[in-house]
Amino acid sequence: MPLADLKQQIADRSARIGVIGLGYVGLPVAALFAQKGFDVVGIDINDERVEKINQGISPIEGKEPGLAELIAEVVASGKLKAATDYSFLKDRDVVLIDVETPVNDEHIPEYHALKEALKSLAAIMKPGVLVIVESTIMPGTMQNVVQPLLEMKCGEGFYLGNCPERVMPGKLIRNLRLMSRVVGGDSPATAGVMKLLYQQVVEAEVDEADWITAELVKTVENTYRDVQIAFANEVALICEAMGADVWRVRELVRKSPGREMLLPGAGVGGHCIPKDPWLLASAVRGLEVDVRLIPAARAVNSEMPRHVLQLLKDSLGGVKGKKILLLGYAYLENSDDTRNSPSDYLLRLLKEEGAEVAIHDPYVEQFNGDLYALAEGCQAAALMTAHSEYKALNFAKLKSQMKHPLLVDGRNLWDKAALKTAGFELVRLGDFSA
């Protein structure tokens, strides 16, 4: 299909859209395009997820404003359907790819899901289709991986672009609508059509670019955040050593114009920040670039759960044979997303030390039991995720259940004075002040 025809179909919303991967990115993207009147088919390998979506039920738990209602609406209208069979994409004019792009233990990108999606799509996609990769990828991936795989399987012409997502669990719909986007096209003309497509659902600015620029923008912005969090975490460790309060230090630093400081905490999780800095660093592997800051920041952030372990050990005189309650297993507050969970790392460390561990999380089905029953006989509770439910705990009831009233606050959620008044021994990450 000529780009001019595709542009007209996008403008009148008759273009048929396919979305591969119906997770935290693909599902809300598909639903938003469907809400605007596009005919959308989503593909996912998870049968249970597909079945739920076709029933108008969101498979994503946690506080996700507007998503459940939106899915129910667009499924009922017939504008969104889900399937596991790629043949449903053979008539699509635009296909978006939203699959995971993890790194392995050596921090090298692993593109199993992306490659399988590309091979499956290439076998059935029609000539003239616009394929857009929304997954975050290592700079150079469009040229070195995506284009060759599609060309290898498809003898006909197609248009190719990437538009990295900018979402966060808990704000999926809001971010997709209000965050700016960068569209990288195989040509300026393709980027222009992509811009028109995203302007159908994005209320913020949509900037045109080439592949490499779009790839770099996403990996750079997440790496910047990782480095800044690592700085905050290192300051927290310094404050502990000096007998100071990092939260007070941060408050006062931020009063100086242009001096921002992010939040320290018990660990950095999720699919993006623990991975995307390695995607950026991997792009120059073998080239004459000595990447030093990115690995250093990753080392600081990835080991914060180990620091929480040390706080527990110092406070309890060791954790062997002691029962510890972990509050929060999702990596992000008010979310069910457990990918790269800092709590999972702390759990493994505690078990290696011989501790007995109980876990509670109101949004993760496996761990959403009775918090107070889980606290029975615990020598300590460690707050790893700042779920809003933990802000309003019945602390008197919690104290009555615990064997020793020690709380380790890894997220600065609780009021220091109030907890001490309630009879708890409170250890707050980054705060060893009197």
Image (cartoon, grey):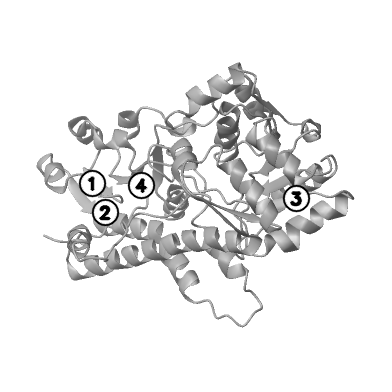
State which tag comes first along the sequence, 4 or 3: 3
Q: Nearer the viewer, mark 2 or mark 4?
A: 4
Q: What crowding class fits label 4: few (fewer than 14 Cα within 10 Å), some (14-19), or many (20 or more)?
A: many
Return the residue at label 4.
Answer: 384
State which quarter of the image contains the N terminus: top right
Secondary structure type for disc 1: strand
* Residue 313 picture quarter: bottom left
247 w.r.t. 81: above or below: below
The kind of residue tagged 4 is Met
Residue at 50% across, 48% down: 166
For marks 2 and 3 on the same chain, the one whose residue lies earlier in the sequence: 3
Is residue 376 visible from the viewing direction of this image? no
Most extreme residue toward the top is 76
Q: How far apart are marks 4 and 1 (CA)?
A: 14 Å
Q: Nearer the viewer, residue 208 or 98?
A: 208
Q: Label 1, on which residue? A: 406
1 or 2: tag closer to the N-terminus:
2
Q: Are marks 1 and 2 in contact (CB under 8 Å)?
A: yes
Q: What element carries label 2?
A: helix
Q: Nearer the viewer, mark 1 or mark 2?
A: 1
- Disc 1 residue type? Leu
Q: Up-down: is 186 above or below 292?
A: above
Residue that mark 3 sits on: 159
- Kindly check if marks 2 and 4 are in contact, taking CB atoms under 8 A apart as contact: no
As helix, strand or loop, the secondary structure at mark 3 comes to strand
Alpha carbon separation for disc pair 4 and 3: 45 Å
**Picture coordinates of residue 326, whole percent (x, y):** 37, 43
Secondary structure category for the residue under label 4: loop
Q: Which of marks 4 and 1 is nearer the N terminus?
A: 4
Q: Which mark is residue 316?
A: 2
